[in-house]
Amino acid sequence: MFVSSAQSRLTHLIRGIDTTDQDSWREIQDLRHSFVNVVVSAAKRYGIDEISSWHVPLVDKFGDIDYRQFQADIDHFITQLAIENSLRNQKESVTIPQQSKEKIRDYVRALRQCVENSQMSDVKRDALLERINEFERELDKQRLTLLALTRLVISVATVPGALWASYEISNRLVLNVIQIVGEAKDLDDQSRAALALTTEKMKLSPPRPFEQKGLSTFTQGSGLGGMDDDIPF
């Protein structure tokens, strides 16, 4: 997401610059160099060693070929990171069978009614109803994130029992939802185990074996640090 944001910002900044003018072309190269600088710096902060160890070229040594090579190599790593992140997200989410989804929706509708009939303040009631809406939106997706369920449970748990029209009913409804999701997660984990999906952090591989020459600009040293609040150039 960071690289995508930086690329969009870069495209926006260089759009309309006259590439036939020498000074304008230098400006484009400076912006490109700043993009390289920012991406390598971000990799350092996020602890992506395979990228953070790259050299950022000196400004006067940075050319069009350097930028094109950087784009190609960073795409290679970003693809691996995106796939790894997708696999990790599967571990932190669950596929809910349609029949179970309908049961959960029934419990959520009942929970909503409990909230609407409660004695809590309008601000607290509106916030909890929005949390329920958020959970329902997540439930409509192909996979339900466990974070969405956790947020709902915590929001309900922070409301004192005395403010509920029936604390026992609301508590039972939440427990029923937790049980259904838990059973689905257990089946999901068993299925994932059968497919032997690893949960360990994957080691990124370079686009080609490192050589003494060739990729030395970006692959044999350390980087530096220039997007709105997040993108310095």
Image (cartoon, rainbow, N blue to C red):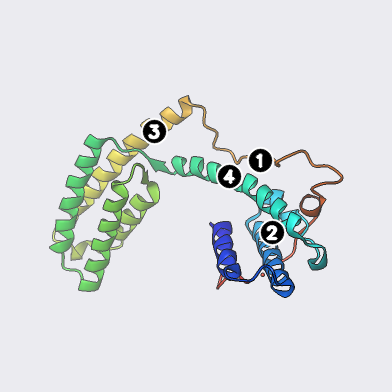
Q: Earlier in the sequence, mark 4 or mark 2?
A: 2
Please tell me in which quadrant of the rendered image residue 228 appears: bottom right
Within 10 Å of disc 3 (Cα), the crowding (few <14, some 14-19, many 20+) is some
217 vs 93, nearest the viewer: 217
Label disc, if present, on residue 79 of the rendered structure: 4
Residue 198 lies, in percent from the top left, at 55, 33
Q: Give the mark toward the camera: 3 or 4.
A: 4
Separation of marks 4 and 2 at Cα, in angstroms: 16 Å
Separation of marks 4 and 1 at Cα, in angstroms: 13 Å
Residues at discs 4 and 1 in contact (Cβ within 8 Å):
no
Q: Residue furthest bottom?
A: 23
208 vs 220, nearest the viewer: 208
Residue 114 lies, in percent from the top left, at 15, 58
Query: Can residue 136 be seen in the rendering of this structure?
Result: yes
Q: Give the mark toward the camera: 3 or 2.
A: 2
Q: Give the mark toward the camera: 1 or 2.
A: 2
- Residue linked to disc 1: 203
- Residue 167's place in the image compared with 77, above or below, is below
Label disc, if present, on residue 61 of the rendered structure: none
Q: Which residue is rendered at x = 64% and y = 71% of the image?
A: 18
Secondary structure found at label 4: helix
Residues at discs 3 and 2 in contact (Cβ within 8 Å):
no
Separation of marks 3 and 4 at Cα, in angstroms: 25 Å
At label 3, the amino acid type is Asp
Residue 53 lies, in percent from the top left, at 75, 53
Residues at discs 4 and 2 in contact (Cβ within 8 Å):
no
Label disc, if present, on residue 188 of the rendered structure: 3
- Residue linked to disc 2: 40
Q: Residue furthest front?
A: 20
Q: Horizontally, is 198 left or right of 18 in the view?
A: left
Separation of marks 1 and 3 at Cα, in angstroms: 25 Å
Q: Earlier in the sequence, mark 1 or mark 3?
A: 3
